[in-house]
């Protein structure tokens, strides 16, 4: 496979995963799929991260995201265990 094809596939995978995060956060539903509102929200987050408290904001965002992933994993585990009983 050519190098450009590998890079294109990697980028496509990354974009799909990022889109999944947007859906997981229910941003599509909350904004009624308003692309301008979504972009505005992302630009607001980017400005926060570029600001003087950006490092602290990143720590908080990361912590909240990890907790959400852990809660989802726990719920999936609980559902799979209750389904097998």
Image (cartoon, grey):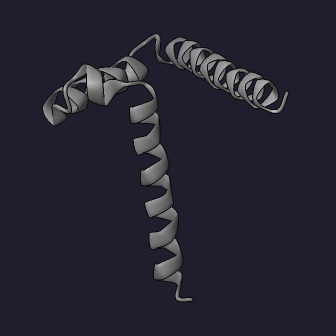
- Image position, residue 13 (x, y; %): 50, 59
**Position of the C terminus by quadrant:** top right
User: Which residue is at 32% across, 22% downward?
Assistant: 47
Residue 82 lies in quadrant: top right
**Position of the N terminus by quadrant:** bottom right
Query: Would you say 34 lies left or right of 20 here?
Result: left
Say which of 22 and 47 sits in front.
22
- Image position, residue 83 (x, y; %): 75, 30
Determine the residue located farthest toward the right in the rendered image. 85
Say which of 14 and 80 sits in front.
80
Say which of 70 and 2 sits in front.
70
User: Which residue is at 27% across, 20% downward?
Assistant: 30
* Numbered disc total: 0
Q: Is residue 84 visible?
A: yes
Q: Is residue 42 visible?
A: no
User: Which residue is at 69% across, 28% downward?
Assistant: 76
- Image position, residue 53 (x, y; %): 46, 10
Q: Relative to residue 21, is residue 2 depicted above or below?
A: below
Q: Relative to residue 54, is residue 21 depicted above or below?
A: below
Query: Would you say 24 lies left or right of 63 here?
Result: left
Query: Would you say 14 lies left or right of 40 here?
Result: right
- Image position, residue 28 (x, y; %): 29, 30
Q: Relative to residue 20, is residue 43 depicted above or below?
A: above
Determine the residue located farthest toward the bottom in the rendered image. 1
Query: Would you say 82 lies left or right of 7 here?
Result: right
């Amino acid at each position: 496979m050519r190098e450009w094809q590998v890079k294109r596939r990697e980028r496509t995978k990354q974009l799909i995963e990022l889109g999944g995060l947007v859906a997981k956060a229910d941003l599509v539903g909350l904004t009624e799929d308003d692309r301008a509102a979504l972009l505005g929200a992302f630009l607001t987050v980017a400005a926060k991260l570029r600001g003087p408290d950006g490092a602290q904001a990143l720590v908080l965002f990361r912590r909240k995201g990890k907790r959400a992933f852990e809660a989802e994993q726990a719920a999936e585990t609980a559902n799979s265990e209750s389904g097998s009983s």
